[in-house]
Image (spheres, coloured by chain):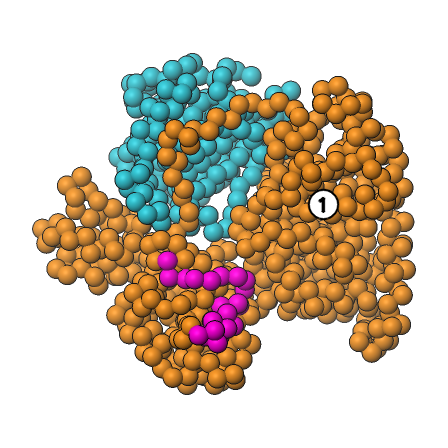
Chain colours: A cyan, B orange
Amino acid sequence: MTTTNLIFAGVGGQGVLLIAELTAQAAVRAGYDVKQTEVHGVSQRGGSVESHVRFGPEVYSPLVVAGQADVVIGLEKLEALRYANFVNQKAGILLVNDYEIIPGSVAGAAEKYPHHSIEFLRQKGLNVAALSASQFAKDMGDGRMANVIMLGAMSVLVLQIEKEVWLATLNERIPAKHRTLNLRAFETGRSLMRDESKRVNGRMSAPLLPTR
Amino acid sequence: MKELLLGNEAIARGAWEAGVKFASGYPGTPSTEILETLAKKYPEVDAQWSANEKVAFEEGMGAAIGGLRVLVTMKMVGLNVAADSFMVFPYSGTNGGFVVISADDPGMHSSQNEQDNRYLALMAKVPVLEPSTAQECKDFVKLGLEISEQFSVPVMMRTTTRLAHHKGLVELGERTEVPKRDFVPDAKRFSVPIYRTLLRPGVEKRMANLREYAETAPVNRIEWRSGGAGILPAKGSVGFVTSSIAYQYVREIMPDASVFRLGLTHPLPRRALQEFCAAHETVYVVEEGEPFVEEHIAAMGITNIVGKSIFGVIGEYSPERIATAIGLSMPDKPDFGKEITVLPRPPMFCVGCGHRTVFDSLRQLKVTVAGDIGCYTMGALPPYEASHTTFCMGASIATAFGLERAGHDRAVAIIGDSTFVHSGIPPLIDAVYNGSSLTLIILDNSTTGMTGQQPHPAAGKTLKGRPAPKMNLEALVRAAGVKQVQVVDTWERKEVTRAIRSAVAHEGPAVVIAQGPCQRLPEMKLSERGEKPYFIDESLCTKCDACFKVWCPAITRTSLGYPVIDPLECTACTVCAQVCPVDAIGAVGGC
């Protein structure tokens, strides 16, 4: 029995919970048992936001165990770093949006911000894939689409859910007036993940997740 | 049909399916989505926000005595507010089914303390149900209502953060209408203080009946399995007694171990527990929060249990916490923080939040400030550090009064509109009555901001979105006897500062009402208001950085060092334009 373990992390307002929800719904559509968890409340005010999604034949705990995440998706570099120790060191991937948001309520944060986190985590042996999702989203005309670009990128890694299932989920869950843009962002993420030349800092250090 | 539902959504569904007709509560994480879901999806349920939890509880109590099935929801500290009636209601017992949700918050994600409300239920002699899955969140509401009617007792359903805010698949059913029960006015039953001595023995008799019910209650489920022995350091056979979400964690790490899953944790099934514990050499008691089940099992004379001594009391549980405690090996969890700065990211005021100007003024005034519960607890954080105490709902005003009595003259209390309505009015009346000179600032953003924009009596709208009479805050504080009352636009920096200075200097109690709707209200979207975002004209900007001092997250720096406003984030609150000494900031297309 295998369970797929995913962690979504980012800053309140980036749409972390939306892509976690879309993933959970896609897993339901694909016929899996699914558990998802998140924390609501004051942390959503520009604070650190995380969501866990687990799916498989039968899932008990909604929480991912540290060191067992197949993919950790960080919509921001510092948040990716914060949850990097959830990545399965042998077979997991840290998927990072190469984008920085300085914590506004921490004194001296601009000076202390760990700009080199991606390089640092690679040195530690983690399989890190970095994409400039926020930049591509801006180029598309809406910086807020970075989350769906990252979702598209992740969908390439999560082989347990077919592309058609993702698209059906997006079509059902995204309101009509935003649908076209979201589908474009999703496709952008998929092609970015497939095209090594578009990933930041060259290629990933290990192959993609095995099919399970 | 199965649907992926949040624990709280499943509770709402359960109430609807079980024929609940009235539901009340006060917003509080992690309980809020229950009533929101009822209001949004289930029109057959008369769902409402009440002024506070005590009011919500008593309205529910009245509706249940009147013969309806009732759900009342609150976070755990909310039950402290409702404790007065919660402790007394069991004396009379109920008529229609009555379930109160106590949403506990181990880990204090969004709370000021960690309290395990099963002890309140113990004190009140109220049975406690603890579901373990989203499906059970739904099913246990119905069961709770049935127990409530069978034993004529209010029932507590205790959830915790992970249960309330996790999603799982739930089998949906249809609504069953339950006929209203007759209410027969009966002073001997419902006038508790007069007939308390007659009612008191009935409470004990009911508890005895509930203890007997617990022995065979289907929600107390023993899963006999042979595994578990041999892989743990503990000698011989091991079993687990567990409840709530902790059951899922135990199953995650020990899928083959014998487990006694308690769905009813008060009162406990003594004989069944004795039998289960006698069948194992070691029994682990795994429960989030206090050692409620563990202490009760120990009191039964059972000695082969291990619980809080290895799992701990503080914070949330997780599979790895339980695994590590019982000696299972877990994957490596590297601590990168030793080698790289993992900066914290505490929450902060939203872009355009009207609270900023108030805390900026207070910071400059250097007065002692007693804060309250809401987004504005963040006024204690950098860069403002202008709120010095926060305890619980409504505590700001009486705390400021006490500080003043202790010699901190001209103390300031700061409270939001929703919290003021919740529990700020009696302490204001008291401060006037007892001759205080405190300043009260009411941050009137027309909503309950922190929990996600719920309306309240001073916001002019109900939970279901219908217009309601809007309580007049100014008239109310004047009626309480406050002579100096100033109403200001919270985004007018100079006005806010002037008003607060004047209030602090005033002899006698003074109130400043800083008005400006929460930026997260849908009607505050720029497009809704027909306004344009602000921008900074680089040809005029002198890079003096004055605009950075309004601490707006929408203002960042370009590679050339100029400040720049994110047009997607800007709310056109105008505060940065007010501080710019060279008028380089204005609305797009407007300057």
The quadrant holding residue B2 is: top right
Using the rendered image of the protein, determine whether residue B372 is visible from the camera's viewpoint: yes
**How far across and how far down the image is residue B121, in percent?**
74, 56
Question: On the picture, is A24 further left or further right than B568?
Answer: right
Q: Position of residue B226 (x, y in %)?
A: 80, 22
Above or below — where is B520 with respect to B199? above
User: Which element is circle 1 on?
Assistant: loop
Which residue does the image show at 60% across and 51% down from the upper left? B114
Q: Residue at x 80, y 74 (%)?
A: B192
Residue B486: horizontal and vertical position, in percent?
A: 36, 78
Residue placed most toward the observer, B515 or B119: B119
The residue that mark 1 highlights is: B291
Q: Amino acid at mark 1?
A: Pro
The verdict on residue A41 being magenta is no
Q: Is residue B109 above or below residue B75?
A: above
At x 33%, y 33%, the residue is: A114
Q: Which residues are magenta?
A: B385-407
Quadrant of residue B573 in the image? bottom left
